[in-house]
Image (spheres, helix red, strand yellow):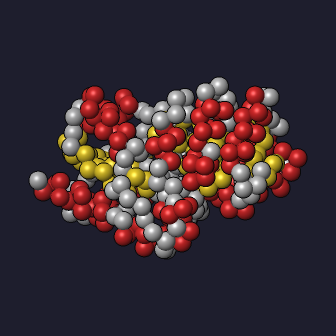
Amino acid sequence: MGKATREAYGEQLAELVRENPRIVVLDADLAGSTKTAMAKKEAPERFFDMGIAEADMIGHAAGLAASGYIPFASSFSMFCTGRAWEQVRNSIAYPHLNVKIVGTHSGITVGEDGVSHQAIEDIATMRVIPGMEVYVPCDAVETRAVIRYVAGTKNPCYVRLGRSGVEDVYAPDTEFDFSKIRVLNQGKNIAIFATGLEVQEALKAMKRLQAEGINPTVIDVCSLKPLDEAGIAEILKTHERIITAEEHNVIGGLGDAIASVAAETAPRRITKIGLQDRYAESGPSAELLKKYGLTDEAIYQAVGRKASE
């Protein structure tokens, strides 16, 4: 098992703090969990623990951005997108301030912390905010690249990270273009669009399918907004059967984003792997992924059914 994306975030943020004196870090009393404590160690004078008060944290981040700093504001995804949604909308997005919101412990792999901590709506609530960019990296290498990338933009951004360790997808020297989707395997007829830790599940399903003579195209969609609509449209036009996979409610997330492009460019029947408009429960993350149909088995079965139609 590889490194958790939240840990890669902490490492990259610490590097950025050393390099750029304009970067400041805010956290909501969770620095040990979000891994921003690594940045605090590098520059304690530019680290602000705002306590258990995400709305207040976002307000301060907005003020710092208006003063010329580049704030990274972190908490669990459920709290920095849910509890502070109004402040994100009115204080950051409306004036289009350069604030980077980084939510860790997203999805149901928060596990035993239960539904109060399991953000399965955050992609939808952040994507709907005008001007807000949304990124969901799948592994440590992509996370480090995303964090460095958003630090260099001037737009408000939301980066969604996880709690658990995940398998490595990319080599350390991989170069990324976050304006584009990334095709990890070029197959034919069947396409699997995945984001976050579901990329690894899609690759596992791909190997099982290839053993049976079915070679699906697998696509990593890291940038949920802005969305590479042209790249997605090309895949849709050349593939008849489409699967999407995300650790999120199927309403408002990756599946709906792909369906929107399909409706305008190449209508397709789309099978959405994700939380089927329901909440999960408390339990070990691996068991929750299996119970709620977010493993490679669910993708394999969905593709298998379509391949036989």
Q: In the drawing, does residue 125 fall left or right of residue 263?
A: right
- Does any portion of residue 136 appear in the rendered image? yes
Residue 162 appears in the figure: no
Residue at the image point whose x is 45% and y is 69% from the top: 281
Foreground of the two, 112 or 226 = 112
Is 179 positioned to the left or the right of 72 in the image? left
Question: Which residue appears farthest toward the top when viewing the image?
Answer: 95
Q: In the image, is residue 28 above or below residue 179?
A: below
* Percent coordinates x, y for residue 60 in the rendering: 76, 39
- On the image, the x and y values in percent for residue 19 come to 79, 40
Picture coordinates of residue 283, whole percent (x, y): 48, 74
User: Which residue is more in the foreground, 180 or 287?
Assistant: 287
Q: Which of the 4 quarters of the picture holds residue 149?
A: top right
Rendering quarter of residue 98? top right
Please report the residue visible at 22 percent of the width from the left and 34 percent of the height from the top.
Answer: 267
Q: Which residue is pictured at 58% across the width and 46% down the height?
A: 81
Q: Where is residue 222 in the image (x, y as percent from the top left)?
A: 48, 44
